[in-house]
């Protein structure tokens, strides 16, 4: 087991990483709450441009609406939970699986609290493609996707070979970016919402992992077997 001093350093690293990522989100949240003209004008212009392009492509609209449903935070947490269960039962990485699932659930809860704290209304657009309930900042979809991308990649990292260690992060990042972008393309979020959600989700997952690997020796990553 790690010594007390090692654990303390791990928690300090996790806290420093988290603070570095959370500060930009806090600044952006303050600008949104203060209704800073530069942020509001840029957000509204981006949503208007995205909607204009999306409305010309009915097939794209359908795809985006479907993507909105399958990437709901609850489904991300459920899919991640199933992967955690597989890693635990089939690969014996119980502690790692519990960390990953706990991180996904905690991130989901944090996004709900952040939305309530900021209380930003969603974009008001005419002839909306779809509607979404609740507050707008940060984007829950973007946050869940970013948390899932980082957390689940780290979860399976010990099981990946050299090629997979390139492919899996690339695929995870692409899915997270598509999920963030589609919120603006549907007109249900401002760009600042998805930027904040993605940054908050990735930061939370990274800070959680740094604390985890320093807290328990079982988190150290073994090298995959070369076959």
Image: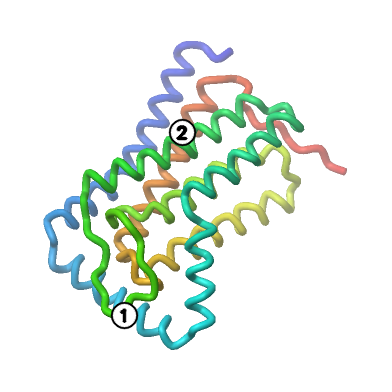
Instruction: State whether residue 65 is above or below residue 134.
Output: below
- Write the residue at 17% across / 68% down: 38
Quadrant containing the N terminus in the rendered view:
top right
Give percent across and percent down for residue 52.
Answer: 36, 84
Colour mapping used in the image: rainbow
- Write the residue at 40% across / 65% down: 183
Tell me where residue 123 sits by quadrant: bottom left
Q: Residues within 10 Å of mark 2 (few under 14, many from 20)?
A: many
Instruction: State whether residue 13 is above or below residue 118.
Output: above
Q: Nearer the viewer, residue 216 or 78?
A: 78
Q: Dot 2: what SS?
A: helix
Does label 1 or label 2 sit earlier along the sequence?
A: 1
**Which of the labelled discs sits on residue 127, or is there none?**
1
Q: Which of 133 and 182 is in front in this view?
A: 133
Give percent across and percent down for residue 119.
Answer: 21, 51
Q: Which of 74 and 90 is in front in this view?
A: 74
Give the farthest residue toward the right: 227
Give percent across and percent down for residue 63.
Answer: 54, 73
Tell me: 119 left or right of 1: left
Q: Dot 1: what SS?
A: loop
Distance of label 1 from label 2 (alpha carbons): 41 Å
Tell me where residue 222 sits by quadrant: top right
Badge 1 vs badge 2, beta-carbon distance below 8 Å = no
State the residue position of label 2: 208
- Write the residue at 42% across / 50% down: 143
Give percent across and percent down for residue 226.
Answer: 83, 42
Q: Nearer the viewer, residue 151 or 169?
A: 151
- Write the residue at 36% across / 59% down: 194
């Amino acid at each position: 087991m790690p010594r007390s001093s090692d654990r303390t350093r791990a928690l300090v690293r996790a806290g420093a990483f988290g603070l570095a990522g959370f500060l930009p989100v806090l600044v952006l949240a303050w600008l949104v709450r203060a209704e800073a003209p530069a942020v509001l004008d840029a957000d509204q212009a981006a949503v208007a441009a995205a909607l204009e392009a999306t409305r010309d492509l009915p097939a794209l609209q359908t795809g985006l609406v479907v993507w909105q449903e399958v990437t709901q935070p609850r489904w991300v947490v459920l899919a991640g939970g199933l992967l955690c269960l597989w890693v635990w039962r089939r690969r014996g990485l119980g502690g790692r699986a519990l960390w990953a699932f706990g991180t996904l659930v905690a991130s989901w809860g944090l996004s709900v609290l952040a939305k309530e704290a900021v209380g930003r209304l969603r974009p008001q657009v005419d002839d909306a493609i779809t509607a979404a309930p609740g507050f707008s900042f940060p984007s829950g979809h973007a946050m869940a996707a970013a948390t899932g991308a980082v957390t689940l990649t780290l979860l399976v990292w010990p099981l990946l070979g050299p090629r997979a260690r390139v492919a899996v992060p690339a695929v995870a990042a692409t899915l997270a970016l598509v999920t963030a972008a589609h919120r603006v393309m549907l007109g249900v979020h401002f760009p600042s919402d998805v930027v904040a959600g993605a940054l908050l989700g990735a930061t939370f997952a990274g800070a959680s992992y740094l604390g985890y690997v320093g807290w328990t020796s079982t988190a150290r990553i073994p090298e995959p077997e070369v076959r």
